Image (cartoon, rainbow, N blue to C red):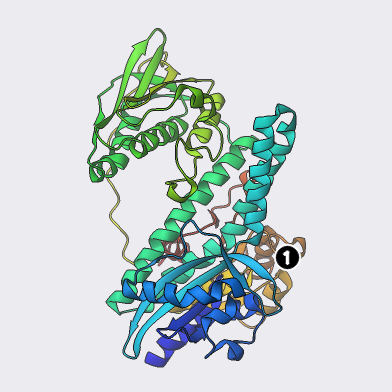
């Protein structure tokens, strides 16, 4: 079992989307995964035993030993060189920008340090383009079209490129949490899970903006009691505010409005989140009152306030009041989403602020024409215990090798038998060897193939009763217009490991 665990752990490190290098106290490389080999242009055997400084540009090598010693004096999980521009050196001599996360590892043979390294060349390029476009727009409004194109390109790239490695990380984390028993390692995995969750929220935010800009989201208007939304806001932020020493006051309101409750809830949650973030002390209050034929919902804080000259920019993407790049908390996208949602609802939003005294954001919604019946409280369903996989056979179709490997590992650790292939033709061939109990397929595969085609082909041979799970990062109208099929469940990437496994058990009826 120990060798199996070690083999799975090594496979997990090799399947990780980032380069991973483990260094001992003297700076010698003890381990490098296959991504590290590809990133730096060395064979893995050429890296083992070499000093880590070999992978740095010449100008950084002289001082790097001192930095290593400083880290060894207080080792902890953290990014390297916060606020600094980090560069690595390829075997052929070219330099490229990187982000590095450091993690200490205690072993019987001494302390080691794991460095996760990501090439951020493309992201830096897009950030530079976006920054240049924004500066040009501020200097001359004539370049607004160029800024919009850079913004759209950045959003599209971030949404696509982050989703696949994020999906891999989430599934690998789920697999490792099932095989790791060491408490320290389990704590590292818990911190990793938190980091993956944070990145998931960023990706979802970027996707929200993309969908709002493309017209993919339309409001579903109905009459509802605003108290339901206010209670959801209170539950989400009462502990967050308390942890910062703030009082969160959500006043009762019995009014009913006509709008889209999900969009209203998202607007208010973004406003409260901003209020909590920019309020170092005091309180955040949410209250509703009639104003003519509307309900005025105010989010008031005692925070830092916004200078009058900056009020016009608070709805711009990536804009944060008085926050340096190294001290960012979030990405400055919340109010941009709020503005788009308010326009979709044909509602109105007012903002007033005074530096040092706080801000008030007021959302005005039309009152409901009639009364709204009180909804009966729904009991929370009891959690379903995880049933054993029982050796069920899963056919997995995924063209991205990292996601395919991570998904296979998770399912095998859970006890499933997995046949993993990359295309429709390979899936058809695999059925000749053994019929699957369930099909999992990505929506967009290589060479223009679609997961829906895979489902149709497999069902054509095995029968329409075969259950399937369709994984997708596509936000287009094509996915939204898919005809409902009770035997096919659609999950949007990035998919949490627990969510995927729970749905798989439900589809198999186990």
**Residue 215 figure quarter:** top right
Q: Position of residue 408 (x, y in %)?
A: 53, 75
Residue 482 appears anywhere in the view = no
> Who is closer to the viewer here, 74 or 316?
74
Residue at the limit of the structure toward the top, as seen here: 292
- Name above or below for residue 9 compared with residue 399: below
Counting the numbered discs, the total is 1
Asked whether residue 440 is in view, the answer is yes
Provide the residue designation for mark 1.
446
157 relative to 388, above or below? above
Q: Viewed as shown, does residue 104 lie left or right of 126?
A: left
Q: In front: 25, or 439?
A: 25
* Residue 446 pos. (x, y %): 73, 65
| Residue 110 image-quadrant placement | bottom left
From the image, which quarter does the N terminus lie in? bottom left
The picture places residue 141, in percent across and down from the top left corner, at 70, 27
Q: Which residue is rendered at x = 64% and y = 31% of the image?
A: 138
In the image, residue 236 sits, relative to residue 21, either above or below, namely above
Residue 338 coordinates in the image, percent (x, y): 49, 31
Residue at x-position 59% and y-position 91%: 45
Question: Could you say whether the residue bearing mark 1 is in a helix, strand or loop?
Answer: helix
Q: Nearer the viewer, residue 364 or 77?
A: 77
Left or right of residue 132, residue 7 in this image = left
Q: Is residue 72 above or below residue 191?
A: below
Q: Residue at x 44, y 32 (%)?
A: 267
* Depth order, front residue of 418/85: 85
Quarter placement of the C terminus? bottom left
Q: Would you call the spot at circle 1 few (<14 residues within 10 Å), some (14-19), or many (20 or more)?
A: few
């Amino acid at each position: 079992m120990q060798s199996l665990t070690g083999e799975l752990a090594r496979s997990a490190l090799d399947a990780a989307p980032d380069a991973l290098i483990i260094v001992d106290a003297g700076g010698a490389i003890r381990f490098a995964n296959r991504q590290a080999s590809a990133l730096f242009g060395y064979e893995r055997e050429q890296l083992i035993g070499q000093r880590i400084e070999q992978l740095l540009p010449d100008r950084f090598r002289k001082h790097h030993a001192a930095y290593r010693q400083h880290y060894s004096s207080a080792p902890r999980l953290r990014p390297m060189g916060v606020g600094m521009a980090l560069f690595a050196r390829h075997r052929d001599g070219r330099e490229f920008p990187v982000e590095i996360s450091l993690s200490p590892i205690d072993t019987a043979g001494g302390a080691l340090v794991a460095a996760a390294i990501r090439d951020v060349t493309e992201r830096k390029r897009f950030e530079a383009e976006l920054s240049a476009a924004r500066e040009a727009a501020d200097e001359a409004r004539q370049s607004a079209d160029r800024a919009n194109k850079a913004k759209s390109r950045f959003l599209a790239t971030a949404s696509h490129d982050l989703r696949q490695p994020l999906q891999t990380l989430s599934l690998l984390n789920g697999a490792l949490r099932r095989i790791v028993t060491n408490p320290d390692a389990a704590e590292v995995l818990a911190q990793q899970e938190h980091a993956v969750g944070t990145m998931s929220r960023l990706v979802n935010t970027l996707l929200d903006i993309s969908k709002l800009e493309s017209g993919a989201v339309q409001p579903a208007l109905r009459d509802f009691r605003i108290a339901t939304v206010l209670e959801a806001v209170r539950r989400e932020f009462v502990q967050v505010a308390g942890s910062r020493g703030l009082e969160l006051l959500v006043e009762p309101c019995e009014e009913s409005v006509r709008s889209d409750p999900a969009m209203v809830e998202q607007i208010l949650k973004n406003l409260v989140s901003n209020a909590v973030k920019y309020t170092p002390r005091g309180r955040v209050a949410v209250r509703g009152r009639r104003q003519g034929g509307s309900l005025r919902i105010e989010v008031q804080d005692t925070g830092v306030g916004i200078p009058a000259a900056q009020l016009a920019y608070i709805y711009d993407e990536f804009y944060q009041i008085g926050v340096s790049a190294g001290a960012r908390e979030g990405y400055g996208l919340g109010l941009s989403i709020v503005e788009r949602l308010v326009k979709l609802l044909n509602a109105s939003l007012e903002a007033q602020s005074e530096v040092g005294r706080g801000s008030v954001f007021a959302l005005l919604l039309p009152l409901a024409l009639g009364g709204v019946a009180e909804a009966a409280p729904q009991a929370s369903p009891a959690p379903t215990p995880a049933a054993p996989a029982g050796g069920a056979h899963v056919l997995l179709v995924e063209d991205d090798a990292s996601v395919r490997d991570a998904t296979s590992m998770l399912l095998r650790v859970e006890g499933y038998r997995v046949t993993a292939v990359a295309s429709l033709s390979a899936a058809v061939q695999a059925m000749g060897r053994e019929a699957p109990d369930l099909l999992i397929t990505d929506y967009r595969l290589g060479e223009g193939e679609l997961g829906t085609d895979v489902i149709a082909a497999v069902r054509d041979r095995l029968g329409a009763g075969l259950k399937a799970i369709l994984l997708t990062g596509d936000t287009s109208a094509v996915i939204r217009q898919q005809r409902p099929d009770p035997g096919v469940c659609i999950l949007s990437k990035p998919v949490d490991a627990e969510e995927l496994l729970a749905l798989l058990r439900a589809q198999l009826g186990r």
